[in-house]
Amino acid sequence: MKLSPSELLVLQTIQQSGGISRKTVADKTGLSQASITKISKMLLEQRFIVEGNRIGSGQGRKEVLLYPNPDKFYFLGIDIGGYRVRLALADYNLEISHEHEYLMTEFDEREDVLQELMMRIDAFLNESGRTHIDAIGIGVTGIVDSGRSRILNIPNCNGWDNLNIVHEMERRYRCPVYLEESGRAMACGEKILGKARDIEDFIVVHIAFGVVAGVFINGQPLRGFNNVAGLLGHITVDDKTYRCLCGNYGCLETTVTYPMLEEEYRNKQGDGPRMLDAYGMNNKNALDVCITAGKSIGVVLSNVINLFNPAMVFVGGPVFDHFPLIFEEVKRTILLRANRFATVGMKLAKSSFHDRQGIMGALALAGSRCLTEEIERLEVRGS
Ligand SMILES: [Zn+2]
């Protein structure tokens, strides 16, 4: 069924709230209490929303909170990284019910990676018992075209160039498909589901086997002319070091990713325990590698902070999760290097979903865009 603009507005307000009273919906939307009563009655009957517990105490009238009905819509999230592909199925509240992951190397020998991916999605949906999904969100650690319909390239992975993924998946699964570069998807996840809900200007940086970043300015993701804004991993930190896959020398990505930290440590240490174990034993070489990496990330972020003046910088991924010293060194370097007027009140924090930031971002894309696009279509039609 088609909803009217006011009905969609009310539904979106309830969806973004995590539990909200009718009165607060009226305050937030500017609609009258009578309209909210009528609309919420219809949304309850059509099972878009459900009622929760009564809240409030004392003499006043107790209010019933409204929630999105988790079973109304189902979303598929796909997180395509340089190392693995993750799939997750979530309900309307973006609670994950099923999850699966594959290594990127499993796609290496395939003639048609897209067909292979869709076959695996079919098997995944089959296993989860779901025959229909309402929207798909895809985050990809690579380059996405400005129309956000094609994957242009995934560094280091063969067969993923110029892939018309949105069109093919929309045809196969008969639902809207939203494609985004993964740093931007992660930032969307932080904005919609995480700690950045009320923040307009922020940056999310995730470091694992690669470096990805998403920048939000004035509440909108920064895209740039070619949809590649945020290539933090390819900012030069030391042009006298290794050559990067991009062709440049000394990119941040050639020094601070998980495998590069291991390699640096191995160069210093020779034989002995793994970097992670050595770090746990306060091994001097492991700590040195962390300090150098933290400085590089901190210098790059200081430049970014001077340029964009974010209110918050969120960092995540195994590099930060496993080596807390890197986080501390990044913080110290930013305080030393970034402009002091830019860092007044600015906070550096861990991102909300750690290792799962990518898949949560993909699900957030599906869940939020699905409804937002419907509203935009109505607004265009109405204007
Ligand atoms: Zn590079």
Image (cartoon, rainbow, N blue to C red):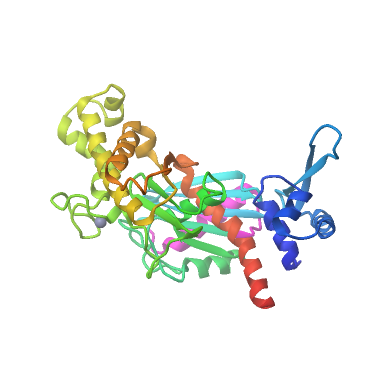
Is residue 118 or residue 291 the one in the foreground? Answer: 291
Is residue 111 or residue 226 the one in the foreground? Answer: 226
Image location of residue 141, percent across then percent down? 39, 55
Taking the view exactly as shown, the residue that stands out farthest to the top is 281
Is residue 165 positioned above or below 256 on the image? Answer: below
Question: Residue at left 35%, top 59%?
Answer: 154
In this rendering, would 33 be left or right of 323? right
In this rendering, would 365 be left or right of 255? right
Q: Is residue 87 visible?
A: no
Question: Residue at left 36%, top 66%?
Answer: 161
Residue 230 occupies quadrant: bottom left
Is residue 157 or residue 235 the one in the foreground? Answer: 235
Q: Which residues are magenta?
A: 109-135
Q: Quadrant of the N terminus?
A: bottom right
Give the image quadrant in which the ligand numbered 1 is located: bottom left
Count up the numbered dots: 0
Image location of residue 338, percent across then percent down? 30, 47
Magenta stretch encompasses residue 213: no
